[in-house]
Structures are given as structure tokens and as C-alpha cells.
Image (cartoon, coloured by chain):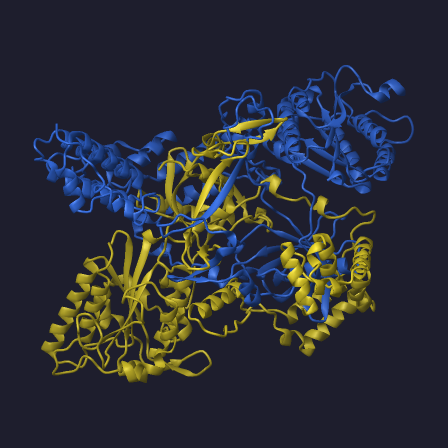
Amino acid sequence: MARNKEKLVLLLDVGPSMHGVLSEVEKLCSMLVEKKLIFSKYDELGVVVFGTEESKNDLTTEVGGYQNITVLQDIKVVDGDLVDTLQKLPRGRVDGDFLDAIVVGMDMLIKKYKDLHKGKKRLCLITNAIHPIKDSFEGSKEDQVMTIAEQMAAQGMKIESIVVRGRLSRDANKGVMDENDHLLSIFSKKTHTRIVYVDTPTSLLGALKTRRVTPVTVFRGHLELSPHMKIKVWVYKKTQEEKFPTLKKYSEKAPASNKLATHQVKVSYEYKSVDGSSTSVIPPEQRIKGYRYGPQVVPISTAEWDAVKFKPEKGIKVLGFTDASKIKRHCYMKDVYLFIAEPGNTRATLAVSAIARAMKEMNAVAILRCVWRQGQQNVVVGVLTPNISQNYKIPDSFYFNVLPFAEDVREYQFPSFNSFPASWQPNDQQQKAADELVQMLDLAPSGKEALLPEFTPNPVLERFYRHLELKAKQPDAAVPPLDETLKNIVEPDPELVAENKSVFDALHRHFELRQNPKLKKSSRQWYQEKQSGSNAHVSSGQAVNSIENQPPVKIEKIGDLTPVQDFEAMMSQRDNPEWVEKAIKELREKILALLIHSDEGDKYQKAVECVAALRKGYILEQEPGPYNDLMHHIRQYCEEKGIKSLPQLLASRDLTLISKSEAEDSDVTAEEARSFFVKMEPKPDV
Amino acid sequence: MGLDPEDVFKDEEDDPDNEFFQQSESSKEYVVYLVDASPKMFNTTCPGNDQKDETHFHTSVSCIAGSLKTQIISRSYDEVAICFFNTREKKNLQDLNGVFVFNVAEREHLDRPTARLIKEFDCIEESFMREIGSQYGIVPGSRENSLYNALWVAQALLRKGSIKTADKRILLFTNEDDPFGSLQDAAKKDMTRTTLQRAKDAQDLGISIELLPLSRPDSEFNVSTFYADLIGLDGEDLAQFMPSASQKLEDMKDQLRKRMFTKRVVRRIEFHIANGLSIALNTYALIRPTVPGAITWLDSVTNHPLKTERSLICEDTGALIQEPPKLFQPYRNENVKFLPEEIAEIKRISPGKLRLLGFKPLSCLKDYYNLRPSTFVYPSDQEVVGSTCIFIALHRSMLKHKRFAVAYYGASSHPQLVALVAQDEITSAGAQMEPPGMHMIYLPYSDDIRDDEEIFPDTEEDAPRADEDQIQKAAALIKRIYVKDFSAFQFANPALQRHYAVLQALALAEDDIPETIDETAPDEEGLTRPAVVKAAEAFKLSVYGDSYDEESDMGKEKMSEASRKRKAIAENAAKDYDWGNLADKGQLKNLTVGDLKVYLNAHNLPVSGKKEALISRILTHMGK
């Protein structure tokens, strides 16, 4: 692991022009450290801020100059204090010089690591780069940057620059900005550099990869165009979902005094025979895997499978090229792969480049059959699309998307829109209103694309890590609502909506929505609740009236006269699970009431009918627990009161406990259920 | 009931969307295949696959056989019955003439398909004439009405189960568009009336009757003669029903395949377009990976299924934990604890809603913006009247302006940013190829995308680019291997096919496992055609010069330093022991797993498994 330890110095511009976004910078950087604390605890990190009034760095004491740069934190292994430091960055008073900051950062890395750890040393600059850097004593600014970049390359350092621009940098001097952009671009000529420009606080949060994953090849070998024509390629993942972290289960059993308690929970699985008679645990060697084939379960041992299963040879083969329009975008099945020519192999790179460019020109895609590893038990068929590189340092490559097999597709038929009645077809005005919306609610005006996936953080993960940090300090803190920056990902941009108020007004004018009056009340109520949550004002008076005028066919309560029928009616209102719960609860109460108010058992017959209905209901819902509890209760009641007739009635109609065979969740065996009322020993009548 | 705390931690694999295919018993489908077996079905032929003529009977039977095979894999809880009418023999509970219910041992008439059913049905044509026989059931002068009888039997078969929990369908295969054509006026009228009444009775019981008509080459099946009334078609439906003469077998199979599966809504969602403007949509999973069914553990002695009991045990005290435990994440040298509800709360962002954020041109939807299979959405006016109208308007605008919508989908387990891409309806020869609606494509976040800068290694020089000549040569090669009519999902999954072939063979206790064809294998023959080889050579020469062969050989030579060292060590070590001697004396178990692996490595054997497995592998390799 040690070889992957990253050494990072953050260079943060805290000058006055940055104050507007500093809270986002704080969140971004603390998230970076929070994730490091979990996923790469041994990474080392230093923090430099520039634009401060005071100066505190080695270079200013050693050689002078390098004003307004403060080393907030020397390079050290990441810890919780770093999060605290980054959460309250100082607000500077002067415009900083980012080049000076870079030099300070480099100096820190060089002093600490000499020329070791090549490729693991990184600088990360966050600035708006709208202020001119100081002129150098000798040579032009460009020469100066060139020297620094060369030095950086020699030391095996990388630099990542996040430049905050657009709406966030107000009216800055364009000449200065262009000059700075040019200077920063020099770095990319000499070293491995990533420069990103962000223009919203939201994209700033997504601009930095807060968790670094070392890319791993999925495949190294030949891309076979034909048996005679092979190109050496490496395959990486291009997208892979960062999952919500898997939390461990916590045990509170250990006494508080036990300081060494791990509080871990072990999940154990035991395999038991279902017969019910014996509850013996079957040892692993006596278990065999069974596979379903229709109603049959076919036992097959692992060894048998190995002998007969599908074993394709490793390799990637082209099945053919076809027109790009043949492959629909929505057929892409999984995360995406990137095919690159074998690094350092010029010929292969040229071959990939030639084919990619030819495909692009012809608007063609290739269909591939891939077996990534030897021993893999399936093949993957997918589509290879060209990726023509815009960056002259980066060679051309391909993207690869997995396509479905015939078995994976359900070809449902849907009615054609033209077949709908005229009242469902939009008229010209409605169509115009929709056209306006589609054109005006624009997220990509003139090249400035909002919510670009590359710069959009995952709001759920952001929320989790922030809450984790908060909870570490206040264990009982509640989950905070999404902050403004993250809201921009899950809700429409209020500015954009305000700009297009007329478009939305037209939409409201031309389209009318109302609840379906034929629908049952309950599900409509559910809808209304949801509506009111989203401050709806469509639900016109008409809709409200229609609820009141509803014919009273709905049974909402179990009456005394026909409890069983009422119960069944309620159970069949399957539109809302609440009905079922309510029906069961009410019938249960009814049964207990019948028992208590029964004189000489005159109502037992009715009670038994109700129990029968209730039992059926619970089996239908597969909820044996509450029913069995009720039966225990009834038995106890009868035992105490010395009632014999009711248990006999129940037993005669087989209305005993719900057993395992009837509901999966029951822990009562069929035997136990049968003997439930038999075993009962009523106390002698007093 | 309530919230299942585990539900919160379900990851992609347990996504509720996927449960779609592991359908439960609660939503079954009961299907009766009603096949006309009149002599006309055997006499009429239509051109089939290999230019050979096939009888209509064969076409119907092979369609059903195909769908049974699909069904046992993906929807094995559904129940089927196969019923012939216009037969010589009769076999049905009602003892009606001219109707024969086909079945096999250990199976009720309407039951889940079994391996035996599939196997025996596969060879039904050989025995059909002998055992069941074909004969016109409706003849002048007789009061028999085989169609009426068939519907009666089918309806009786479908009496099982409640209409609330099951879909009931009759699929009727016939090539006779006028079943009572041979009768005289009064008798014809009477029989028509009673048969229609029978069908209506069935429909009133919630049974749907669907017709799969087979057209004769010379005259088209005329639905309006009789069957339009039977299945309740009128007006526009009727016009669309037989859009073109579907004479070809392929069309027929296609039709059946599409009707085999009734649509299932994955869930209903609310599409929030603007404040106060929320429409109702249904989502459907049109594409999801099909995986071999779940494993059931069996007791190898009795072959009875085992019950799995999961228990949580405290590692410190060994005590059993009953209540759903809290969760924790080690952080800052502490355990930060969460309640399951808190985790659910963190994930809850506009739950159940799809919120429109805006629109982008289609060119912004990059090829690498993909994580999971897409979901199809289609409007519904069931709850909110007017939904379809807005949806159609947006759909048209998006197609016209070539834009897609960006929206936030607050699914409870997996809230995500999505792209909604409008898909226009595509029909080909009357069949719907692509349904109209929108596809919801799940977009990645910044953390999910790997930067090119990280993947590509550092280089001093600029990346090489192909020149015009090389591109031309590549284009020439591509043209040679061009497939014109490719469909995205034309291949069967060879692994899955193999899996079920093995299962079927074992289920029927057959000795040999049938060979399965790997449809995904490249067309080696086609690729070695002289024209292709020539184009490949030209491309090679243009890019590689004369050095192509050296290049491809270099791979073997250029084994990395580290792996060469490892191999050398392994070979040396392997020599160190007298393996044969050790094996003979049974002393292999005295060696460490590491030592054993050295031997396995040296002989290119797999190194997985427990020590015993390794030893037995070595012994097998030595032939002992």
C-alpha cells in the first residue's frame, strides 16, 4: 500500500476576490480529507493559503520575497485536525500570486521527500487567477513558468489547477485572465496537468476527485480485427460508480467498561432442513447447490459444473462494423470501458488512431466479443465507439459499452401516440408551449454546460460524509437538509426558472391536469398529499368537489352487523396497503370485543367466523406473527376464564396457529399448530 | 411490515428494478394455448426458415415450444396448458368432442411448465397423427362445435386461481378465418351466436382471448369475417390488427414473443415539470441482464431444500442480537454510529419524484455517460388526467429539437441524475420495433468518471496520430467487415444457453448434454476471405510497415522483469522437491500451501482452492 501513498499540497487562494466561493472550497477540501481518513489513511497532506496579509513560509525566511503566503499546515499524515483547519480557512486581504504559491508548495515537497516518490507528489491549486502575477527579475513570465514546469517534471510532480471563473469571478480584467490562462497552460506542455475551469459553486464541488482510485487494467492483449490483424490494447474502466460506503453493524452488547471491545457483529448463516421435525444444522460438506428449472430443483455439485460449463477463451474479437444508428443509446447496459493502445507502442497507437478516425468519418461502430480473463464464464458483447482526442498529448482511443443479449430484452408493445383520442393530443398552442420549454430551459447555453457529469458531485455522498464529520463531533446531530449548492443538482436552478417565467406561465395556461375522478378515494388522497407537498395549485375547486360527491360505496369501518363481509371488502381495496392494516386491526378488536361481551358463549359462533376471516387475511398478507399472538391471547383468556367451548369450536374448524407451511415467516411447525388447542388445560371451573 | 432496515443498504445488484425478472408468485399468468389441429392446418404451408415450406401446424407448435423454453427460465411460476381442437381423439375433463388437452406425467393440466413437458412437446409432431389425430370438428349436419368446445375447455382450465392475483389468457392459433363457413344459414347463425356468447362469458370472467392468425399464401386471413367479434376488435384496432400479411414464420414468432410477456409496470412515478405541474409516468424495465436463477441449497443426502437462518452475533460477547443493529463507520479513531433510519434519511432526496432540471442538446450525452441499464417511461392518465398530453408535447419537442431532458430521480435506494431521451416509434412491416416514449439513462457523477489524464501514462512527446493514408486504409478494411443489418440484441447469451441446456439434461436425467451454439463467435470463415485479408494486409503495411510480425511476437519475449524473476524462482523451487516421491509417500500434505502453489504455477495449473484441493490437483496432474 505504501507505494500508493499520495503526497499532496493544497494551494488555496484566499484573496478578497475568492471570498464568495471560499465556503465551497472549505467543503471541497474537507471532503477530500474526510475521504482520505477512511479510504487512504496514510496519505500525507500540506495546506498553503495565499492572499493573506501575513507571510509564513520557509522561502520567505530563507531567501526573502514570497510575501502573502502562509503555510497553514506542514505536510503530515492526514488526521481529524486537518479537517478542522480546512473548515475555517482564513479570509485574506490581498490579491495573491499563484505562481509564488506553486513554488512554495514545490519547495515543501522537495524538502520533505527529495526526489523520491516520483508520480505520487501532487500540487492542487484552487484560484480564480484574475490577478496578475509579479514580473520576474530575469526573463519573461513565460520563461519563469517554463523553468518551474521543467523542475516539476524532473521531480515527478503533478499539478492540478481548478480555476474558478464565469459567474464566480465577476468583472475581472480579461487581459490578465488570458495571460494567466496561458501561463497555466504551459504546465500542461511539460508535465502531467489537469486544468479545469468551473463557473458555479456546484461544479466547484465536483471539480476535484475527492477519492483517488488507481486505474487498473481490465484486459491487456490483442484486439483482433481478423485472425491476421491484431492490435495490442489495454482496457480500463472509464466510469465506475462510487458506491455508498458499506457500514458495519454495531453491537452494543459489550459492557461499557470493556475498552478493547470491537463492537463488531458477525453474521452467521446456518442451513437447516425444512422438515420441521429435526432442527439439525447441515454441515457445509453435506450441502449441495440446487438450480431451479421450472418447478424442479436440480442438484449439481461444483465439480460437475466445472466439467460442463461454458468456458470461452480469453480474447477480444471484432464481430463486424456497423452503422452507428443501428445501436440505440438506451441499449448500453453497464459502466463504460476505455480501450487504449498499449502504452509506448507507437504502431499500435497509430493503428488505433487510424481505425478510430475512419470509424468517425464513416459514422461506424464496431461490435466486439470480449472475454476479459481466462476462466471467465461468460462472454460480453458490446459496441466500440471512437473517442477522438482533442488534447494533443493524449492519443485517440475507444469507448466500449456492453450490449444486451436476446434474453435480456423484453419487447413490450406500447400504443402509438397517434392512436390516442384527440383530447390527449396536444394542440398547436400546447405544442408551442412545450417547444418553448424545451428550448428555453436550456442547461447548455453556448458551450457553458451546466450540470456536466464530470463536475457534478453526488449529493447523497456529499451529505453522508458531511454528516459523518458532524456526527463525529455531535453524536446525536440530526441529518441536515441539503445546502444551497447541492440543491442545484436536485432541483431546477431558481435563476433559470425566474428567467423563463413567461414560458412556465404559458405552460400552466395551456395544460390542465386533474385527478382522475373515477379513481378510488384512498389513492387520490395519497396523490393529494404528495401534491400539497410540492405546493401545487392545480387542484382546482373541481377536483375537490368531486371528492365530496363521491358515491359512498367505500367501506372504511368494520361494523357490528356483517363484520366478515366488511373485512373482506376492506381487504380487497388493494390500492393502498393501509386499508389492509386497518381492516386487520379493526377485525382483531372486534373479535376481542365479542369474546368479552359474550354471555354464555352466544357470540362465539360469530367470533369464530371472524377468526376464520382474519386468519385468511393474515395468511394472505404473510404475516403470521400478530395472528399467532392473538391466538395465544385467546387461549390464555379461555384458560383463565375456564371457557372450553370456544377453543373446541376453533379447533374443530382448524383455526389454529398459522404454521410455517402456510406463511414463511412463522416459526410454528405444523405439528405445534395442530396440538395448540389440544394441549390446553383449562382450569377447573370456580 | 414497515421499513426493512436492510433495504437501505441494498446495492446495485439488489436494486428493486431487477426483481422484475425474479417475479414472485403473487403476480402469475395463466395461459392456455389453443391450437387448431384441423386438416387445413396440416395442408397449408408457408415458406419457412430454410426456404423449405412448413405447415401451419408446425409453425404454431414450434412457436409454443420456443416460448415454453423461455418461460421455464424467466417466468417459471406462470402456468400453461396446451390444448388442441379439431382432433380425432378427445381428452378433457368435460369429455367434449374434438378437444384434446396435451399433458405429461406429474403435472396438472394447467400447471407450471416442466422439463418433461418441454421435451415431450418438442416431439409432438411425430406422434400427433397416431395419438391425437386431426379431423374437422364443424361439419354440416352435425351439432358438434369444436371451437365452442375448445373455448369451454380453456375457460374451465382457467377457473383456477383468483383473477386478482393472476392474468388469464387464451392464445388461439388458427388459419381458418371462417370456422362456420361450411354450414347452412340457420345452423351457422346459431353456432356463431353460441360461440360468441361463450367467448364473451370467458371475457366477463376476466380471461382475455388473443388471436394469432396464420395467413395462407394465396389469401389473407380475414379477421373481420368472424374473429373480430370474438376477440372484440373494432374500428381502428381492427385496421391495425393485421397490418400486412404476416405470412412469414419469423413474423409469427416475433408476434408471439412480444405477446408472451404482458407488460409489467416497475413503478409509478411523478414527473415534476414545474411547480404545480406534475404528471404521472409508469416505468418499465425493458432491458435488464438475465442471470441464472438463484441457488437453492439442498441436503446432499436427501436432496431436500435447506432453510437458511441468518443470525447476528456480537463478536465481543458472543450474544445473539435480535433487534436490527445500529451501523457504524470508523472515523477519526472513533466509531461513528448511525441508525438505519438516518441512512435512509441521508438518501432521501425528493423521494419517488422525477424533477425536471432542464434540457441539453443530444450531442452533450457522451458515450461514456452510462452506469446501469436504462429504464423506459411511458405516460399514464390513470391517476392524473392530462399527463399523456403534456408528455406527447414534450416528446415531440425533444425529438424536433434533438434535445434530451436532465432530471433528478429520487428513487429511494438509489437517487440519481438521469437523462431522459425521447424515442420515436419505429415500426417495420407492421411490427413495433421501438415503442414511443422516453428512456431514462442514469448519469454518472464526477466521482464515477475516471479522467483520461490519469489513465494515459506520462509522455514527453505528443501522441501519434494516424495520417490520411492510414485512415483511408482503415476505412477500406472496415468496409470489408461491415454488417448492414445488425440488431443490438440478436445474440443469445452462450453462457446462459449452456447453463439451461445442462440443467435440462440433468432434470430429465439424460446422459449427454446437447451442444449449444455460441452465436457470438466471430465469422472466422468470412474474415479469411481474400478481400478481407487483402484489406487487412494493406492496413498493416500502412501502419506497421514491415515490422508487424516482429511486433506481435515481441509480446511473448517482452515478459516483464518481475514476472520473469517470479517464474525463474518458481521453476527452481519446483525442482527442489522430489514431487513424485512425496506424492507416493503421501507426504504432500506436509508441505505448505505456498510450496504446493509453486508446483501448480510451474505447471500452469490453477492455484485456487483449499489445501486438499491443491494436493488432489497435483496428484491428478501427475496421474496418480
Q: Colour of chain A?
A: blue
Residue A521, placed above or below residue B254: above
- Residue pictured at 26% horizontal, 77% vertical: B176
- Residue pictured at 14% horizontal, 38% vertical: A646
Residue A458 rendering spot, x and y as whole percentages = 56, 36
- Residue pictured at 74% horizontal, 55% vertical: B595
Quarter of the rendering containing residue A181: top right
Is residue B410 visible from the viewing direction of this image?
Answer: no
Residue B376 rendering spot, x and y as whole percentages = 44, 51
Residue B358, placed above or below residue B333: below
Residue B99 rendering spot, x and y as whole percentages = 22, 75
Residue B27 rendering spot, x and y as whole percentages = 32, 53
- The chain whose colour is yellow is B
Q: Nearer the viewer, residue B433 or B107?
A: B107
Residue B346, placed above or below residue B538: above
Q: How many marks?
A: 0
Quarter of the rendering containing residue B528: bottom right
Is residue B108 visible from the viewing direction of this image?
Answer: yes
If the image is split into quadrants, where does the C terminus of chain A sit?
top left
Q: Nearer the viewer, residue A211 or A128?
A: A211
Left/right of residue B125 with respect to residue A299 in the rendered view: left
Left/right of residue A493 with respect to residue A603 in the rendered view: right
Kindly give the residue lying farthest to the right in the view shown. A138
